[in-house]
Image (tube, rainbow, N blue to C red):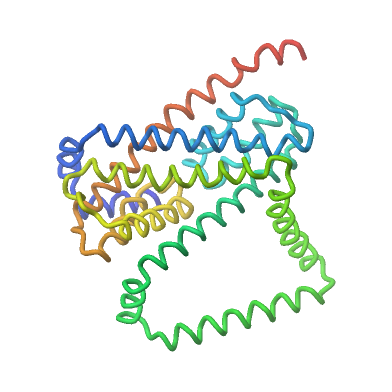
Amino acid sequence: MGVFLVWYSLSKVSLNELLVYAKNADYTYIIMGMFLGFLSHLSRAYRWRFQLEPMGYNIKFGNSVMAVFATYLINYTIPRAGEVARASIITNYEGVPFEKGFGTIVAERIADMLVMLGIMTITLFLQFDFIYSFLVERFNPVKIAVAMVVGVLLMLFFFKLLKKSKSKLAEKIKNFVNGLIEGSLSIFKMKKKWPFIFHTLFIWGMYVLMFYVTSFAMKELQGISLGAILIGFISASFSIAATNGGIGSYPLAIYAAFSLFSIPEQPSIAFGWIMWASQTLMIIVFGGLSLLYLPIFNRKKQVDS
């Protein structure tokens, strides 16, 4: 899938044209964007320790940082495999049971999802007239409203059936849903919940800021609106979740978002590639170094054991 998307995006803008955009880019802003992304990853590693401490595990910050960078690198191979690897790394080097480590990762993803929903809500309010007119031009609002009502009714009907059912599958689904709810609520029960919330907001603040700052690297995007930045960021974020680290899909997602604001195709896709390549380079370097250095960093502990 990723290979096809890479080919498709390069069919819109040739490699030679991309190289021209890359050559003319202001690398001061690209490096600044990479640094902001790096700060977000450090914050994520520090935040993770708040979740593990109540269970009696005070893991080394170095191991947490390297596990996080390894997560992002491994996700380029198999989507979401990095989360499993991250829990396994802490199991191997810090003695945290896998299921507990993985449970905290699920809980933090729920927190991230809530912040993402917050960003989407803010974007909707800021760009309500634009988004509403865009949808009305292309979709029948009555049909959308009916579809939403039907969807809600079907969900309520499904949950009612699920609640009454005693089958093994229903019990597994209920346990999974209850676990997700408990995991998300545990965030507010932890001892350092306010630092956790601060780091969660900081992480996503850095994500948005790195996207915005990197846009200054291209003169073709000077004066881009906040609405375009937010919608582009949301679209790009979903592309990362849908494919292996956004390979191929990231530039296309940004083009799809920017086209709503009449931003030309070529600079939109070029910006997507510059943005994706710079962050990917950082992940490859620090993720690779992390995987190499983890056994060295923990050598003393392994010798002692």
Q: Please, is residue 265 above or below residue 36 in the view?
A: below
Q: How many marks?
A: 0
Residue drawn at the location 35% of the way across and 46% of the way down:
211
In screen coordinates, is 254 left or right of 300?
A: left
Give the residue drawn at x 75%, y 60%.
178
Of the pair 171 and 232, the residue shown nearer to us: 232
The percent coordinates of residue 108 (x first, y second) are 62, 47
Q: Nearer the viewer, residue 303 or 147?
A: 147
Which picture quadrant has residue 274?
top left
Residue 228's spot in the image, x, y percent? Answer: 30, 59
Pick the front one: 225 or 14: 225
Q: Quadrant of residue 66?
A: top right
Can you give x and y, in whole percent of width and height, for residue 32 in the image? 33, 34
Q: Is residue 47 left or right of residue 166?
A: left
Q: Residue at x 42, y 54 (%)?
A: 239
Quadrant of the drawing holding the C terminus: top right
Q: Is residue 57 left or right of residue 214?
A: right
Residue 164 vs 245, above or below: the answer is: below
Q: Residue at x 26, y 47 (%)?
A: 271
**Residue lying furthest right in this view?**
166
On the image, the x and y values in percent for residue 170 come to 77, 68
Residue found at the very far front of the displayed protein: 194
Quadrant in the picture for residue 91: top right
